Amino acid sequence: MSKIERNDYISDEAVVKRANEAVRIELEKKKAMDIPVFIYDSEKQIIYQENSDGTRVEAGKKLRKERYSERVAKKA
């Protein structure tokens, strides 16, 4: 069994690039199959359902304002 060396790892930039490409491909696949996708608008804090024809329907809003770690700290 060979030992993995540090220089055998891929860079963080390469991981991000691959992840972004995987998401892009999955979105294209859903569009081709006429399956709606859900997109979160972080500025407006609204969740949208986007159909394959490009139309958007509001599916929901963010329920909580604070982060999970802030909620847990309040309970403790």
Image: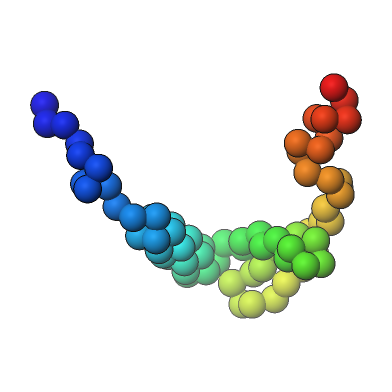
Quadrant of residue 4 within the rendered picture: top left
Q: Nearer the viewer, residue 45 or 12?
A: 12
Left or right of residue 6, residue 16 in this image: right
| Left or right: 47 in relation to 28 | right
Which quadrant of the structure image shows residue 1? Answer: top left
- The residue closer to the viewer here, 6 or 57, is 6
- Furthest-bottom residue in this view: 54
Seen at 67% across and 62% down, the residue is 39
| Depth order, front residue of 16/20 | 16
Tell me if residue 17 comes above or below residue 54 in the rendering.
above
**In the image, residue 47 lies at what x, y percent?**
75, 60
Q: Residue furthest left?
A: 1
Q: Is residue 68 above or below residue 34?
A: above
At 21% from the left and 46% from the top, the residue drawn is 8
Q: Viewer-proximal residue, 61 or 58? A: 61
Q: Is residue 39 at all visible to an observer of this figure?
A: yes
For the C terminus, the image quarter is top right
**Residue at left 12%, top 31%?**
2
Percent across and percent down for residue 34 are: 55, 66
From where the camera sits, is residue 33 visible?
no
In the image, residue 18 lies at what x, y percent? Answer: 38, 59
Question: Which residue is drawn at the image coordinates 64% and 69% (left, top)?
Answer: 51
